[in-house]
Image (cartoon, rainbow, N blue to C red):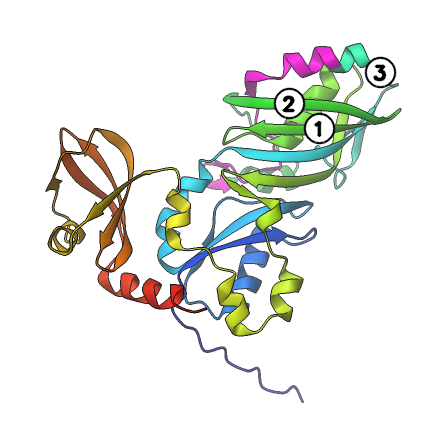
């Protein structure tokens, strides 16, 4: 007879956990594990990583989920290994081999292709992706053997470095705009080299300002006490670190939180992080136009009170 499962007592948790996602887990599986370890009521992530990819996965808890979209849109940096001469059905090591060609690679070839794929490029999204067609994910069509027509997308490769690891392997380091598929980039680089390619390893080393060196693993998190786990959380406002900051006195802060615009001598700004000054607390986002502070996404008073309590934990 199976022992009854222990029910986890959930609690309000607010903040951002920088997780180093392991290989083999989906982003949602990693999120659910971290949510369980923190006993958090509400959680979400800032864009998925494939099960075969590791690296930076910011997880948002509580009030931070309101601002997760900001990091869905952030630039990302990746390191990947590509096997030349072999194409697969998925663009990575999970797929079936669909083409094999000889490899004859020179340093000049890598230099040429590196220049070719740096800057604005167009990509056709892969069939094995979560993009939707008629309400159904493309990977679901792919599993049924159905090829769906996909429109090419404009993306930007901000920086690209290619290096040869062996006769049949190259390393790809790329800093890219949102919506860029690194598997597709690897395949397209292979085609440009005339031999085809697929990814054998992929790691995200940064998303926006969040770098892998600041991340914690699930294994490390599991070994911690509850207090140590909470101490790993970054404050909610870490998601808006690049925004212009505006501080409001108590009376203006209360009115701003009720959705009212405030007037002041602020210059126009598209992205503003708004704080109350007594005590200092993150209130939400806004933009400034013609001297008016116009509310965007806001925390509610209970969330603000709870975040102050969370941040007070040593």
Task: Please name the residue shown 87% across and 18% down the image.
Answer: 103
Name which quarter of the figure residue 43 lies in.
bottom left
Task: Please name the residue shown 77% across and 24% down the image.
Answer: 163
According to the image, label 3 marks what residue?
105
Badge 1: few (under 14), some or many (20 or more) residues near its Cα, within 10 Å? many
According to the image, label 1 marks what residue?
172
Badge 2: few (under 14), some or many (20 or more) residues near its Cα, within 10 Å? some
Q: Are marks 3 and 1 in contact (CB under 8 Å)?
A: no
Name which quarter of the figure residue 225 lies in.
bottom right
Q: Nearer the viewer, mark 3 or mark 2?
A: 2
According to the image, label 2 marks what residue?
160
Quadrant containing the N terminus is bottom right
Mark nearer the N terminus (3 vs 2) = 3
**Residue 236 pos. (x, y %):** 38, 53
Circle count = 3
Badge 3: few (under 14), some or many (20 or more) residues near its Cα, within 10 Å? some
Disc 2 versus disc 1: distance between alpha carbons?
Answer: 7 Å
**Residue 67 pos. (x, y %):** 37, 47
Circle 2 sits in a helix, a strand or a loop, which is it? strand
In the visual, does 182 lie left or right of 60?
right
| Residue 227: in magenta span | no
Residue bounds of the magenta highlight: 111-136
**Residue 314 pos. (x, y %):** 46, 68
Who is closer to the viewer here, 16 or 11?
A: 16
Task: Please name the residue shown 48% across and 71% down the image.
Answer: 39
Circle 1 sits in a helix, a strand or a loop, which is it? strand
Q: Are marks 2 and 1 in contact (CB under 8 Å)?
A: yes
Q: What label does residue 53 carry, if any?
A: none
């Amino acid at each position: 007879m199976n022992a009854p499962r222990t029910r986890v007592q959930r609690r309000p948790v607010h903040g951002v956990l920088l997780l180093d996602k392991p290989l083999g887990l989906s982003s949602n599986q990693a999120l659910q594990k971290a949510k369980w370890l923190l006993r958090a009521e509400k959680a979400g992530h800032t864009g998925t990583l494939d099960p075969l990819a590791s690296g930076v996965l910011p997880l948002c808890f509580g009030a931070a989920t309101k601002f997760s979209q900001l990091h869905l849109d952030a630039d990302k940096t990746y390191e990947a290994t590509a096997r030349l001469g072999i194409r697969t059905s998925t663009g990575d090591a999970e797929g079936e081999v669909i083409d094999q060609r000889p490899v004859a690679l020179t340093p000049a070839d890598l230099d040429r292709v590196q220049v070719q794929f740096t800057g604005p490029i167009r990509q056709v999204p892969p069939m094995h992706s979560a993009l939707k067609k008629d309400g159904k994910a493309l990977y679901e069509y792919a599993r049924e053997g159905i090829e769906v027509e996909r429109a090419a997308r404009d993306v930007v490769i901000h920086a690209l470095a290619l290096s040869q690891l062996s006769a049949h392997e190259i390393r790809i380091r790329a800093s890219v705009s949102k919506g860029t598929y690194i598997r597709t980039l690897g395949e397209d680089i292979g085609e440009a080299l005339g031999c085809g390619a697929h990814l054998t390893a992929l790691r995200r080393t940064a998303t926006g300002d969040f770098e892998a060196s600041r991340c914690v693993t699930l294994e490390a998190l599991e070994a911690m006490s509850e207090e140590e786990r909470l101490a790993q959380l970054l404050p909610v406002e870490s998601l808006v670190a690049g925004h212009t900051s505006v501080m409001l006195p108590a009376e203006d802060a209360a009115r701003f939180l009720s959705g009212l615009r405030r007037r002041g001598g602020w210059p126009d700004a598209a992205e503003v992080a708004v704080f109350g000054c007594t005590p200092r607390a993150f209130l939400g986002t806004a933009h400034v136009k013609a001297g008016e502070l116009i509310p965007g996404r806001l925390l509610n008073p209970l969330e603000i009170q709870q975040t102050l309590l969370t941040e007070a934990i040593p």
